[in-house]
Image: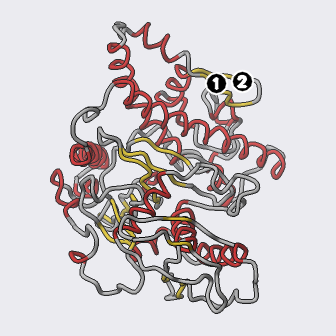
Amino acid sequence: MLRRFVQLAALSVPFIVGSISHAAVWKVTNGWNAQWEKAFGKYINELPLDYFNHPGTPYYNIPTDCADAAYTLRVIFAAENGLPVNFYNWNGLNLSDRNTQFDSISDDTERLRKFIRLVNLNTDTGTLISETYPIAINRGSVIPGTMLLHSPKKEMKNGVNWTPPVLASNHVFYVQNVSASGLVAYISSTVPAAVRNLNVRNGYVYAPFNENSGYRAWKWPYTEGQPLESRLNGSMEQFGLANWVSAIFATKDTVVAGRKAMWAQDKAWSDVVRSRLQGKGAGREINPTEELNAVMGNINNGLNDRIKVVLEGWNAYQSRYNGRSCMSPDDYDGFSTPTRDTRIQTELAYLPAAAMRYLKSKRISPTPKQLEKFYSQYKYEVAPGTIVNLNQILSAFKGRKALSISEPEHSPLIRWGVTEYTSSKQWPCPQHAKKYLGSDNF
C-alpha cells in the first residue's frame, strides 16, 4: 500500500493517504496549493540519488531520461499524497490519475508503475513546455522542485540552421537546493533512458534559449486557460534580466560572434539570477571552498559519466562490428559524446579561477607549478588499468587531441587523449569525422 506521511502547517491534523481505489490509478483526497508545492520541494530536496536504482525499494528499476525523471517524481509524490495529475501529450492523449486501463491490477505499487510507464512513453521535454509556466526569480519562487528547462529550436538564418549542434538537445533539471550564496544544486537523468542514479549539477552558467526555457513550475491540474499572473509565482521577468535576447547567437553576423555573444549573455544572466537568489547574513557570499567543490563536483560528475559511456561504446563497437566497420546511425548517436564533451570543456574552463582562489585562501601562491601539483591529486581510471590525472584531462580537452574525442569508433585511449591518431588510416569511418566539433569551445 502506498503511504506517505506529510503534515503541512496549513493542516490542523496529519493526513494519511489510504489505499489506491479502483476506477482510478489512485484515490485523490487533496488539491494542489502553495503548501503542497513546498512539500513537493522537500521531497525533491531529500531525494536520494539512487531512488530508481536501489534494490528493494518500491521504485527500483524504473528507467528514466531527463523528462521521464521529471514526470515520474511528480507522479509518485502526487500518488503518495492523494494529489491529482492531469497531463496531455503531443497528440492530446490525456494522462491523469483518473485513468482506468490498469483497474485489473490489484497491487497499488504495480498499478502506479504501469501508469508511470504510460506517462513516460507519451511525454518528453517538449510536452513539459505546455505543462509548466515561467516564474519570478527570487528565493521564494526558485525552490526545490522548480524546473530549469532547456528547450531549443532551429534558428534559421540565410537558409542555415545556426543552432550549435551541442546545444540542440532538450534537457530538464529539478532544483534540489539553493544555498545561502545563491548557488543552485540540480538533479536530473539523461539519455538514453536507463535505470541509473540521478546526476547532480552544482550551479549552471546558463541563460534561457527562448521563452519556453528557463525556470518553470508545474501547472496545477485542470487550470487550463488560467492567466500567468494569477498562477503561483508566475512571471515573465526572467526574460528581462541582463538585457536578455532570445537565441542571441543568431542575431550576429558570424558564428564566432554569435557564440561570444551567447557566452556573455549566459554569464550576465546567471550573475543576476544568483544575486537574486542570495540569502541574508552569513554565507551570502560564495567562499573559495564552496566554489571549488561546485566546479570539481561538476567536472567529476561529467567525467565519470563519460567514462561509462565511452567503455560501453567501445564494447558495443567490438561486439557488434568487430572493431572494423562503421557504426549504424543509431549506435553512433548513442555512443558519440559531443554534448558531454562540450559540457566537460565548459566546466574545465571555470576550474583555473576557482583553483587559484582556493589556493590563495590557503595562503598558497597559485603559480603554474602549484596548479599542476594541485590538479595531479584528481585521478580517473578512464579504461581498465589506465589512470590519468586532471592535468592530462585538461590537455586532452583543451588541445587538438579533443578533435577526435567525441567519435565512438575510436579506442578509449584515443577518446581520452592518452594517445592520438596520427593519420587518416586510424580513422575507422572518415565520413563521421568532424560531424561534431568536440574541441569547439562554446
At 84% across and 48% down in the image, what residue appears?
Answer: 319
Q: Amino acid at mark 1?
A: Val
x and y, in percent, of residue 83 in the image: 49, 77
Residue 154 lies in quadrant: bottom left
SS of the residue under disc 2: strand
Q: Could you tell me which secondary element the residue under label 1 belongs to? A: loop
Residue at 44% from the left image edge and 30% from the top image edge: 293
329 displayed left or right of 201: right
Q: CA distance from mark 1 to mark 2?
A: 9 Å
Foreground pick, 16 / 392: 16
Q: Amino acid at mark 2?
A: Thr
Query: Can the viewer see residue 149 in this picture?
Result: no
Name the residue at 50% across, 18% down: 375
Are discs 1 and 2 less than 8 Å apart at CB?
Answer: yes
| In this view, 43 is above or below 270 | below
Return the disc, 1 or 2, that comes first in the chain's sequence. Answer: 2
Res. 4 image quadrant: bottom right
Q: Is residue 346 visible?
A: yes
175 with respect to 28 (left or right): left
Question: Is 85 located above or below residue 291 in the figure?
Answer: below
Q: Position of residue 222 (x, y in %)?
A: 40, 86
Q: Residue 418, which numbered label?
A: 1
Give the residue number, with chain letter if any, for mark 2.
Answer: 386
